[in-house]
Image (tube, helix red, strand yellow):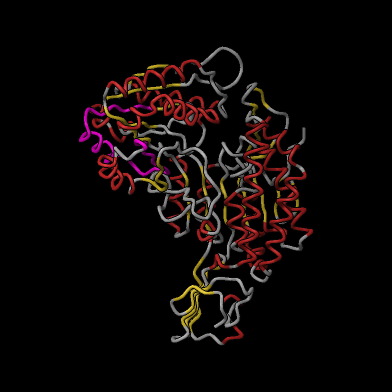
């Protein structure tokens, strides 16, 4: 079997002096798939950088409507070839074709691309600002270099580096992309790239807008994130790898946007358990085991107050976890890390109540696992017990009273989400009002009375949060148009002659619909 080519400068070509080869593995059978992919040397990376640098310059002169046309056409092409994508993604990840890939993740992917196209045509996303008195005007524009996207293992479509949300945001804001495929689903990414390059040709966009490298050495990834030609880096993955990238990029003064680990604490107030304990247990189980627990928004930590109702809730939850089949994990590495994480929590005093065994049969699997720990023991090791277990695992913390519950919440690290369940007639308002101000500063998305899995592609969504959930609390990886701003620079024009201004900053509104901030007022009018 020949080694699959990389995509550089619009040309599929053999990797130059690869430093290794790899194959994807079917997690359900634990068998390697037949296609071989190169581990690129820095020669490939450098060629991709040069091609992207040229494309960045060319993209500056491409009208927004043509970029929007590419995004819409790409979404259409993806839908046309959905069966090929679903087939290979299911082989590489063992994620079910239905409903996960066909009915959930693929529609989300094409919806993101179409929302990005609409934002591109509208242009309001660039936040054009005009001060007529001082003749100063500004807008957000492209970075002038490629956005390097490191794709995650758990979303082969919606976060794919050649089709997902980061890709849509980077291209819409005028930047080319260097995609680093995840080694868990390289074939899926290759099919996306094949479609993308054809649609680029059809829409007369620079072919260097999309580059694809399947894998490279970690040190070369750090060197890439810090390279002078790079505009920014987007990463979704583990905290360890993310922080190494951040260090390299920060030292070079390069923007880097990270989505790392999150426990997504769920706080159960007494009234909620008195009212519908069994229903909350079912919701927790479903959320925790959805996708075999391999979602960044999985509820990995539950905090409640010790009481007969909380013990009844816990017994119900144990029963659900114990009798459900173990889901398939994405890789051997995922399984190994999960076992290691559970063992670390147990050493620190968390009791493994059920699960933590590998069932017989093929597939990377671990029984759904539930742990419990007292509030006192949790507060003895708050940092060590706040460790993400990427799988069907959750830790239940029993606080002895309201005061201890507040201390536990105060000890929380930054998370993507935080949920509070309370009694429906507002009988829990007193504890809620004490908890909410503390939790609000710990999370990107505050939730009431529902579990955190499920991220809507909405302009109001925040898929972000304080460190260590992400590298910066002010940005989101989901939600158009705000996610576009990560990959922009602020362009200011002071006393620039009218005919030399970008269209968005000229007196006439270029679309007639674009919102601009003119002399302190958001308006669609001309100056």
Image: magenta residue range: 395-424
The picture places residue 451, in percent across and down from the top left corner, at 45, 36
Q: Quadrant of the C terminus?
A: bottom right
Q: Quadrant of the N terminus?
A: top right
The picture places residue 264, in percent across and down from the top left corner, at 41, 38
The picture places residue 63, in percent across and down from the top left corner, at 68, 70
**Whether residue 492 is visible:** no
For residue 263, above or below residue 108: above
Side of 175 relative to 312 (left or right): right
Task: Please state which of residues 497 and 460 is positioned toward the viewer in this rendering.
Answer: 460
For residue 87, above or below residue 462: above
Side of 392 relative to 344 (left or right): right
Task: Please state which of residues 115 and 227 is positioned toward the viewer in this rendering.
Answer: 115
Q: Quadrant of residue 263?
A: top left
Is 401 within the magenta? yes
The picture places residue 72, in percent across and down from the top left corner, at 71, 56
Residue at the image position 62 percent from the left and 34 percent from the top: 100
Residue at the image position 46 percent from the left and 16 percent from the top: 322
For residue 137, above or below residue 194: below
Task: Please state which of residues 511 and 200 is positioned toward the viewer in this rendering.
Answer: 511
Side of 35 relative to 419 (left or right): right
Q: Quadrant of residue 303?
A: top left
Looking at the image, the residue that sits furthest to the right is 202
């Amino acid at each position: 079997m020949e080694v699959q080519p990389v995509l550089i400068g619009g040309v599929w070509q053999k990797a130059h002096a690869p430093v290794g080869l790899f194959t994807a593995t079917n997690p359900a059978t634990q068998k390697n798939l037949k296609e071989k992919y190169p581990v690129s040397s820095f020669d490939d990376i450098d060629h991709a950088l040069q091609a992207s640098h040229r494309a960045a310059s060319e993209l500056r002169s491409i009208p927004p409507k043509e970029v929007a046309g590419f995004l819409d056409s790409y979404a259409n092409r993806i839908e046309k070839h959905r069966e090929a994508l679903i087939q290979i993604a299911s082989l590489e990840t063992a994620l079910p074709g239905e409903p996960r890939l066909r009915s959930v993740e693929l529609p989300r992917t094409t919806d993101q691309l179409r929302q990005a196209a609409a934002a591109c045509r509208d242009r309001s996303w660039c936040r054009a600002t005009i001060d007529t008195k001082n003749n100063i005007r500004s807008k957000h524009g492209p970075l002038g270099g490629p956005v390097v996207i490191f794709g995650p293992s758990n979303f082969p479509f919606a976060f794919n580096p050649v089709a997902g949300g980061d890709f849509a945001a980077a291209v819409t804001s005028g930047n080319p992309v260097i995609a680093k495929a995840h080694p868990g689903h390289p074939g899926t990414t290759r099919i996306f790239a094949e479609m993308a390059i054809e649609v680029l040709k059809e829409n007369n966009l620079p072919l260097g807008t999309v580059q694809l490298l399947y894998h490279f050495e970690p040190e070369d990834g750090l060197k890439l994130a810090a390279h002078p030609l790079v505009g920014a880096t987007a990463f979704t993955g583990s905290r360890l790898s993310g922080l190494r990238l951040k260090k390299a990029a920060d030292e070079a003064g390069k923007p880097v946007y990270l989505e790392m680990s999150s426990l997504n604490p769920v706080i159960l107030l007494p009234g909620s358990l008195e009212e519908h304990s069994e229903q909350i247990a079912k919701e927790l189980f479903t959320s925790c085991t959805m996708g075999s627990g391999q979602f960044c928004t999985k509820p990995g930590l539950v905090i409640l107050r010790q009481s007969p109702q909380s013990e009844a809730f816990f017994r119900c939850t144990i029963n659900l976890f114990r009798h459900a089949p173990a889901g398939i994990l994405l890789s051997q590495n995922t399984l190994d890390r999960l076992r290691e994480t559970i063992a670390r929590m147990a050493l620190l005093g968390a009791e493994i109540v059920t699960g933590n065994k590998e069932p017989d049969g093929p597939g990377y699997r671990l029984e759904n696992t539930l742990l419990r720990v007292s509030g006192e023991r949790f507060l003895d090791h708050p940092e060590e017990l706040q460790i993400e277990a990427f799988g069907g695992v959750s830790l239940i913390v029993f606080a002895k009273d309201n005061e201890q519950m507040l201390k536990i919440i105060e000890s929380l690290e930054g998370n993507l989400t935080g949920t509070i369940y309370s009694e429906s007639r507002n009988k829990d308002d007193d504890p809620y009002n004490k908890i909410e101000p503390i939790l609000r500063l710990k999370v990107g998305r505050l939730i009431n009375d529902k579990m955190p899995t499920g991220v809507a592609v909405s302009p109001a969504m925040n898929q972000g949060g304080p460190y260590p959930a992400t590298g910066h609390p002010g940005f989101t990886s989901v939600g158009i148009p705000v996610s576009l701003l990560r990959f922009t620079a602020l362009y200011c024009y002071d006393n620039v002659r009218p005919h030399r201004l970008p269209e968005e900053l000229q007196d006439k509104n270029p679309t007639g619909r674009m919102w601009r901030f003119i002399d302190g007022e958001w308006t669609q009018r001309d100056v």
